[in-house]
Amino acid sequence: MAKALRIVIAGEGGQGVQSVANILAEAAYNKGKEVLYIPNFGVEQRGGVSVAFLQIADEPIDTMKFATADIVIALSGRAVARSKQYVRKDTIFVYDSMVDAAPEEFPTEAKQILAIPAMEIVKREMHPRVFNVFIMGAVIGATHVVELAAAEEALEHKLGYKFAKEPELRAMNFAALARGAEEVAKEVG
């Protein structure tokens, strides 16, 4: 990757936005990438809009802030409104199709706007607790910023203690990761 890949993930507090960004950052860093992750929390720990700003590159990253993202993921109506300022003509904008937002809240320009049935899929095929890992897979499917195996390693590092107590969580998280990547990859092409 020649320039830094700029990622914005936004959602409600408690949706795991910061966990996803942190695990993606760790996965990229472990594979020798340059990484810059800046969390931005809403006023309330749970219930406020949480935004994660993530840059990943092969070369040193020259600026902490960016005005335009390459990919924006919005997980709630308020997150759509909060994150659309980072969307331009070269941005892929992805949102959960269950998001409740008025049409005027969505960005008017983007390279591609994708509504994915993330929550619907995890409820039907897995469990809602892996929604954020599905979203991480969606980021990977759209950007190929890291291999799924690198994300699985980072997940293992972060959640290994939980996996040891509940082994079925490992399989469920890895399935959510792969399913999220698959869902977006078929749309992005």
Image: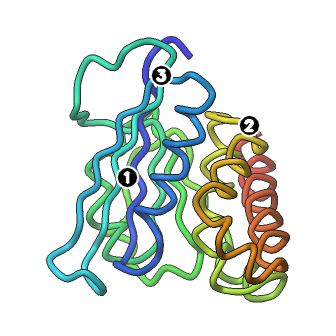
Q: Check whether the beta carbons of the residues at disc 1 and disc 2 lie within 8 A of each other.
A: no
Give x and y (percent) for residue 22.
Answer: 46, 52
Quarter in which the C terminus is drawn:
top right
Task: Residue 59: name its quadrant.
Answer: top left
Q: For mark 3, give the secondary structure.
A: strand
| Earlier-in-chain disc, 1 versus 2 | 1
Count of picture labels: 3
Residue type (three-letter) at the residue carrying disc 1: Thr
Quick one: 59 or 72, which is closer to the camera? Answer: 59
Quarter in which the N terminus is drawn:
top right
Please tell me which residue is depicted at 49% across the width and 79% down the height of the picture. Answer: 99
Please tell me which residue is depicted at 47% across the width and 71% down the height of the picture. Answer: 16
Residue type (three-letter) at the residue carrying disc 3: Ala
Q: For mark 2, give the secondary structure.
A: loop
Residue type (three-letter) at the residue carrying disc 2: Glu
Q: For mark 1, give the secondary structure.
A: loop
Q: Check whether the beta carbons of the residues at disc 3 and disc 1 lie within 8 A of each other.
A: no
Q: Determine crowd level at label 3: few under 14, some 14-19, many 20+ residues with C-alpha closer than 10 A.
A: many
Give x and y (percent) for residue 58.
Answer: 51, 16
> Real-space Cα distance between discs 3 and 2?
14 Å
Residue 107 sits above or below residue 96 on the image:
above
Between circles 3 and 1, the one closer to the viewer is 3
Please tell me which residue is depicted at 26% across the width and 50% down the height of the picture. Answer: 85
Residue linked to disc 2: 147
Residue linked to disc 1: 108
| Earlier-in-chain disc, 3 versus 1 | 3
How is this picture coloured? rainbow
Residue linked to disc 3: 57
Residue 50 sits above or below residue 3 on the image:
below
Please tell me which residue is depicted at 62% across the width and 66% down the height of the picture. Answer: 159
